Image (spheres, rainbow, N blue to C red):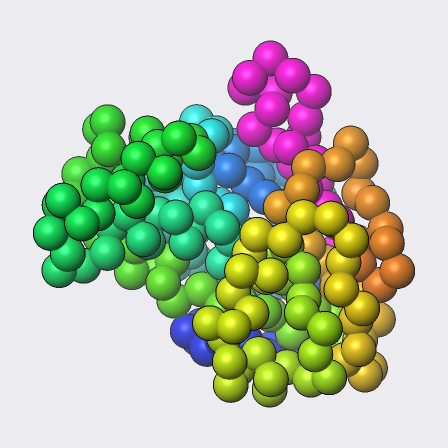
Amino acid sequence: MPKSCKIVLRLEENAAGRDFVCGDIHGCFDDLEEGLRGIGFDKARDRIFCVGDLIDRGPKSGLAGEYMRAPWFFSVTGNHERMFCDANAAGMPRRFLAPYVRRHVANGGDWAYDALSPEVRREIREEANSLPLVIRVGNILIAHAALPEVENLEEIEENPAEYLGTMTWLRGPYPAMRIPGIERVYVGHSIVGEPLESGKYLNVDTGAFLKYWGKKGMLTILEI
């Protein structure tokens, strides 16, 4: 099924298989594959939607481009994708990019500069720049941090720069969800011990990378 680089990616419900959502992956693609095997995920029929932050902090962020190209995998953009794209912007002098690189490295992006080739960085940047801010599947929305307090998705499409900060960085109380006909909004960004419901929001970021830091964490996968 074709993908899109629209601000809002609208998809029909999956008539051929099942749909799942997962929390922030942060390079933990082995954990994703293990989870998919555990639910009997069929890559020819099923789909999985990630709430963003595919990269940084975990062990295999370099695989992110491969997953973003997979026809069964969909993700919104997270703040870590935005940091990566800022630090690897095309056609910019290195001195201009240096503060963005430092910021990215400080937030777990050292993997991108220690051993990754410029070609692979370019591929990941191109894929990451194509990720939407919101995915809508039927009456379900997927975003990274939160949705702004808007009446419809067209407002986001018309003013993406205005809402980018809220949608990729917001922590704290969620803005009121005013879009009619929406039953659930899946988000991540802020780590919780287990999936946490707040009104129509469900935060599914349970800290997948933390187990690689000697702490308690896991990748949550839920059927939509």
Q: Residue at x 46, y 77 (%)?
A: 6
The answer to whether residue 151 is above or below residue 31 is: below
**Coordinates of residue 202 in the picture (x, y in percent):** 79, 53
123, 31: nearer the viewer:
123
Q: Quadrant of residue 62?
A: top left
Q: Is residue 216 magenta?
A: yes
**Coordinates of residue 99 in the picture (x, y in percent):** 27, 41
Would residue 86 be visible to someone looking at this image?
Answer: yes
**Coordinates of residue 132 in the picture (x, y in percent):** 49, 68
84, 19: nearer the viewer:
84
The answer to whether residue 115 is above or below residue 82 is: above
**Coordinates of residue 148 in the picture (x, y in percent):** 67, 69
In the figure, is residue 178 to the left or right of 4?
right
The answer to whether residue 157 is above or below residue 83 is: below
Q: Which residues are magenta?
A: 203-224
Tag count: 0
